[in-house]
Amino acid sequence: MPLDTGLAAATVSAPDALRIERGPRTGQPIIISLDTTGPGPALGGCRVKPYLSWRDGLDDALRLSAAMTDKAALAGLPYGGGKTVVALSPATAAHYAGTRRGDLLADIGEAIESLGGRYITGPDVGTSCEDMAVVARHTRHVLCRPPHAGGSGDSSAPTATGTLACIDAVRARVFDGCPASELTFAVQGLGHVGVLIADALARQNATLTVADTNPDRLRLASRWHARTADPARLLTSDVDILIPAALGGALTPAIVQELRCRAIVGPANNQLADDSVADLLHARGITWAPDPVVSAGGIIAAVAREITRLPEPEVQDLLTAIGERLGTLLDEAAATRQTPLQVAQGWRRASRYPRRVSASPG
Ligand code: NAD
């Protein structure tokens, strides 16, 4: 089916790296951005959500695939970065949550299969492990199907494990190894990953302040004896460690001036509104742990379990190593008087494969 004029125009600049086509069953535009395939197939999830314009979905695909390039490179994975985005119109989105979902997932699977293994997908915002089992009927190149369907399942647990290892690395360096029970934490977002992090910190008797824009999620606070905060004020809570576990772009130049934490370590992707925020945080003496390093547990575990087929103890070792990697990065930043972002960018450049666009909030 031919694309409309606007879509066709967007495909001409880099046809090998950017695929935009309409699904034959649904007519929905499916955007697949392969930011890099030099190190190996591009890894990155499949996002299905309403956008005001398909171009917003295209922007998301470009910057999220770039962020996946960084994440894979900084994790030492022999893979590139990619992303699928299906930009639903707000008017028809409900169809694709219900009766037409199977058709949409079939269209996505066929589009991925047509890339011949240059791209491997998985769940993301708006798709689940169960959806990946349906996509997998049309392509082999899918991670994180449910275990009963042959996959490694939800990646939230390894993402939380990697984040907790990074919190330990920050406790060791910024708080002289002070136990979590003597520190205060603010968790922004009580979704799949945020809840697991809060559970683990509560088990260590940490003092928690939490926020979520969804009031149902906020009810969980009682199980951790946590304080609750207005989502708009959570970031500026007077705590030791701030844990962004909601959406990207939370750390803006304006908010940095109001922060009262000493360190920021969280799984949210693309936390900085722009790179200048890393300098502002540094100037204020706030240690920021780069999110492409912190949030890599999910992708590291999925590759290790489903592709390299490592035994489980070795998978756990890889997740623990995320904290060691962050520790090395922070030590290098301190020794060379660079920001953690500058060190991460240096490591990224040393990994040889340039990315196509710069990552920004997503
Ligand atoms: P999720 O959608 O399950 O949870 C996000 C939560 O944040 C939701 O409960 C939502 O209501 C809440 N929220 C949104 N805006 C908020 C705000 N302004 N203030 C407070 N709460 C807000 O997502 P998740 O799977 O838990 O992932 C959390 C973050 O970690 C995301 O940025 C995601 O991209 C990133 N991440 C997740 C994984 C994974 O394996 N799930 C892997 C890598 C990175």
Image: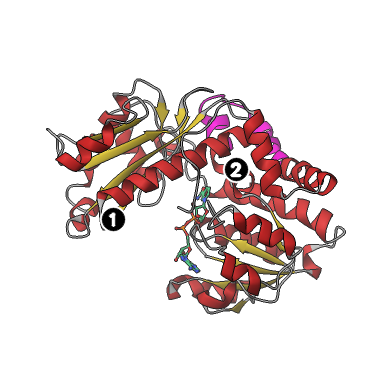
- Tell me the SS state at disc 1: loop
**170 or 250, which lies in front?**
250
Mark nearer the viewer, 1 or 2: 1
**80 or 93, which lies in front?**
80
Specify the quadrant that holds the N terminus.
top left
Q: Amino acid at mark 1?
A: Tyr
Q: Is residue 219 part of the magenta span, yes or no? A: no
* Left or right: residue 10 compared with residue 188: left
Residue drawn at (59%, 70%) of the image: 255
Question: Is the C-beta of the residue carrying label 1 under 8 Å from the nearest atom of ligand 1?
Answer: no
- The mark that comes first in sequence, 1 or 2, is 1
Quarter of the image for residue 11 reads top left
- Residue 26 position in % (x across, y down): 15, 41
* Left or right: residue 168 compared with residue 151: right
Question: Is the C-beta of the residue carrying label 2 under 8 Å from the nearest atom of ligand 1?
Answer: yes
209 lies above or below 62: below
Residue drawn at (57%, 70%) of the image: 254
What is the total number of numbered labels drawn onto the structure image? 2
Q: Is residue 321 part of the magenta span, yes or no? A: yes
Q: Which mark is residue 51?
A: 1
**Does the image show residue 137?**
no
283 lies above or below 352: below
| Name of the residue lying farthest toward the left | 1
Point out the stretch of residues depicted in magenta: 300-322
- Residue 242 position in % (x across, y down): 66, 65
Local crowd size for mark 1, using a 10 Å CA cut-off: few (<14), some (14–19), many (≥20):
some
- Tell me the SS state at disc 2: helix
Q: Which residue is mark 2?
A: 297
- Residue 213 position in % (x across, y down): 45, 72
Q: Amino acid at mark 2?
A: Gly
